[in-house]
Image (cartoon, rainbow, N blue to C red):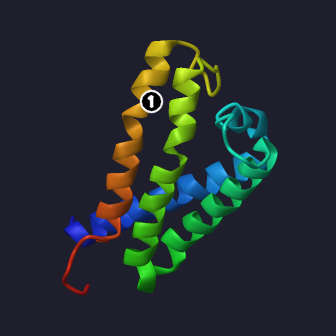
């Protein structure tokens, strides 16, 4: 399989994952996402969940369909993953059970997956490549 085809598959899978996660923010997983909102945020937790869900849906669809702008979308997705990381840290530090993460060990392990998502977004969109594709 050609490497660009492999990257495109991973880009589309990430896009689907993000769109699904965003939809779940607004519907069936709302309380799980509310549990991750850091208490120090200056806006309401519900608004935070709704806005982050809308961003995830938008980024998900952009990863799948905005191929012409995939590098910019990849960068934006990576920045988004960094921006929401404090929620994961808050869940760990405050020992909040959500998404089946009901032990300190499980919550700690999850923290190591966020950099994987950042790298996935950058790699699958060739966001850091200087040459035009």
- Residue 35: image x %, image y %? 70, 31
- Judging by the rendered image, the residue that carries numbered circle 1 is 110
Q: Nearer the viewer, residue 10 or 55?
A: 55
Figure check: 93 above or below 124 = above
Q: Nearer the viewer, residue 91 or 65?
A: 91
Figure check: 67 above or below 108 = below
Q: Is residue 5 left or right of residue 131?
A: right
The residue shown at (37%, 76%) is: 71
Q: Nearer the viewer, residue 34 or 62?
A: 34
Name the quadrant containing residue 56.
bottom right
The residue shown at (42%, 76%) is: 72
* Residue 122 visible, this angle: yes
Structural crowding at the residue carrying mark 1, measured as other residues with C-alpha within 10 Å and reported as few (<14), some (14–19) or many (≥20): some
**Count of marks placed on residues:** 1
Q: Is residue 67 left or right of residue 31?
A: left
Q: Is residue 117 left or right of residue 119?
A: right
Give the secondary structure at mark 1.
helix
The residue shown at (76%, 49%) is: 43
- Residue 77: image x %, image y %? 47, 62
The residue shown at (69%, 38%) is: 33
Quadrant of the image containing the N terminus: bottom left
- Residue 12: image x %, image y %? 46, 64
Name the quadrant containing residue 124.
bottom left
Quadrant of the image containing the C terminus: bottom left
* Residue 27 visible, this angle: no
């Amino acid at each position: 399989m050609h490497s660009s085809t492999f990257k495109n598959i991973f880009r589309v899978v990430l896009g689907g994952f993000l769109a699904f996660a965003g939809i779940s923010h607004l519907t069936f997983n709302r309380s799980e996402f509310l549990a991750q909102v850091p208490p120090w945020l200056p806006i309401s937790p519900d608004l935070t969940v709704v806005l982050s869900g809308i961003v995830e849906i938008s980024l998900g669809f952009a990863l799948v369909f905005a191929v012409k702008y995939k590098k910019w979308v990849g960068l934006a997705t990576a920045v988004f993953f960094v921006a929401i990381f404090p929620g994961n840290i808050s869940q760990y530090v405050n020992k909040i059970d959500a998404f089946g993460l009901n032990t300190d060990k499980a919550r700690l392990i999850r923290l190591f997956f966020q950099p994987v998502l950042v790298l996935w977004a950058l790699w699958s969109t060739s966001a850091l490549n200087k040459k035009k594709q």
